[in-house]
Amino acid sequence: MSFADLKLIEPLLKALAEEGYTAPTPVQVQAIPHVLAGRDLLGIAQTGTGKTAAFALPILQRLVTQPSTLPAGSGRPPVRVLVITPTRELASQIGEAFRAYGRYLRLSTTVIYGGVGQGPQVQALARGVDILVATPGRLIDLLRQGCVRLSGVEVCVLDEADRMLDMGFLPDVRRLLAMLPRQRQTLFFSATMAGEPAELARGILRDPARVEVTPTATTVERIRQSVLFVEKPSKQDVLERLLRDPAMARTLVFTRTKHGANKVVARLLQAGIGAEAIHANKSQSQRERALASFRAGRTAVLVATDIAARGIDVDGITHVVNFDLPNVPESYVHRIGRTARAGADGAAISFCDRTERAYLRDIEREIRMRIPVLEGGPPRIEGAPPRAPARPPTHSTDEAPPGAGQDRRPHGPRRDQRQGEQRPGEQQRGPRGGGQGGRQGGGIQRSGGFRHREVRAPAPPASQDSRGPRDDRPQAPVSPIFTGPRPRGDRPWDSSRPPRRRRGSGPSRQR
């Protein structure tokens, strides 16, 4: 079947040919006729299967073939199509898709989101907008200021509908839907839709057509998934060894927290591996620069939080690494869906420590398969783009980092490094604690008025893990990729030192 068989108009067919589209995907074949007919729709399909074109193409054709029946009035022209997305990156990509498909149509598209000044967005809205792509927060702000009208919306699209209907976005979505006309067409698209979001969708959609190309939460068959059991202290070392393999040409690494993403990037840069971070604490300009560098191949590694699990569409991502397993199984599906897009091959490698094994079981239950243990090096991907050149490390691996052991304060070295030097007018102080060497026996020593904590080994693990039975799968065999420190859980415990007591437990220590 071709796009012409879907009864699309000639300007759209011409734009699709210039974009390199030859045949519609299954979700497009099933969804476009329903959208052209004006029915509400619930579309469920894997990531990377062309869901954006499945609703953008028929919407553009409707706007051209069915002019608005509302009078223009004396104010600004009303918005005819509203697309609501959870992230800025996804909103930007959807806006670009509408402009690309509608390049030969006299229709205007505007994207609004937070993190940037609203002046240009307000000016664009004042000139009149046919298609508005927005994130909920900035859209509600502009509605309160009277900068946008939603009384003329004919079609409303919720992309990544399962996330838009969770408890984080649900209040804003309800508020926005209440401002729309009752007579409208509503489209929900997502890669996963189950549980409470599915129930909410049934209450919003009116007699919807359901398009489900694949069973809910199945993963793309072209992604080679694997898991590597490694304890948290060793994850960074294992990641660096993986990324040094030329097979990891363009890699997306996911962490659970923003601080974790920054920490991973800092360590990679010290090791001479080019990497950038993208998360909510970054400004929009920083996020756009990092994404553009990654998309252009200047940066080989992009480290991100789940904000990028649904907002990144980059061709040629060869590997996805879950540095931290997500605690929501559906997020795993969206994360690994960033690779193997548009018919390409890809690989997903997940690190799992002992605290994340429950997450792994939930993920395997969700995707209905058992993820094999990684053996050897990372999978090779045919047709991978050229790898970005490695950066020289910020310091020699045989030497301490710059500034190590030096005080960075402008007023000079620390007191204990001055070896008894005395400032003018300062009295000489002896050691605290009433005895030589300060406090004894408590793991804390004082020298020159500064405290130094002695790090002690933790207590030996119990014979039975308190978190439940351990995974019975064997650990990954040691290969040249993993010739580093073994996971902490496999090291022999030092029983020569007593376990360190927590504060407030046991008898009080003598001072």
Image (cartoon, rainbow, N blue to C red):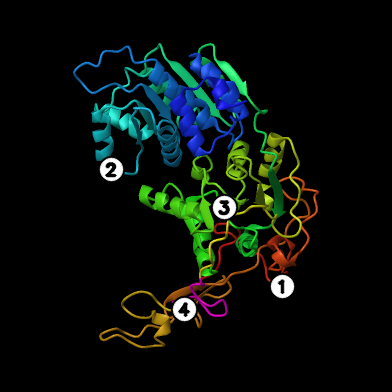
Badge 2 crowding class, 10 Å Cα cut-off, few under 14, some 14 to 19, many 20 or more, is few
Q: Eyeballing the image, is 256 above or below 491?
A: above
Q: Amino acid at mark 2?
A: Gly
Residue numbers of the magenta segment = 392-403
Q: Which residue is mark 1?
A: 496
Name the foreground residue: 195 vs 350. Answer: 350
Residue 183 sits in quarter: top left
Q: What is the three-letter code of the residue carrying label 3?
A: Val
Residue 182 on the magenta segment: no
Q: CA distance from mark 1 to mark 3?
A: 39 Å
In the displayed structure, does residue 114 sit left or right of residue 479?
A: left
Residue highlighted by disc 3: 253
Q: Which mark is residue 405?
A: 4
Q: Earlier in the sequence, mark 1 or mark 3?
A: 3
Kindly identify the residue that appears in the image at 39 percent across and 20 percent down: 63
For the residue carrying disc 1, how many other residues have a C-alpha within 10 Å: few (<14), some (14-19), or many (20+)? few
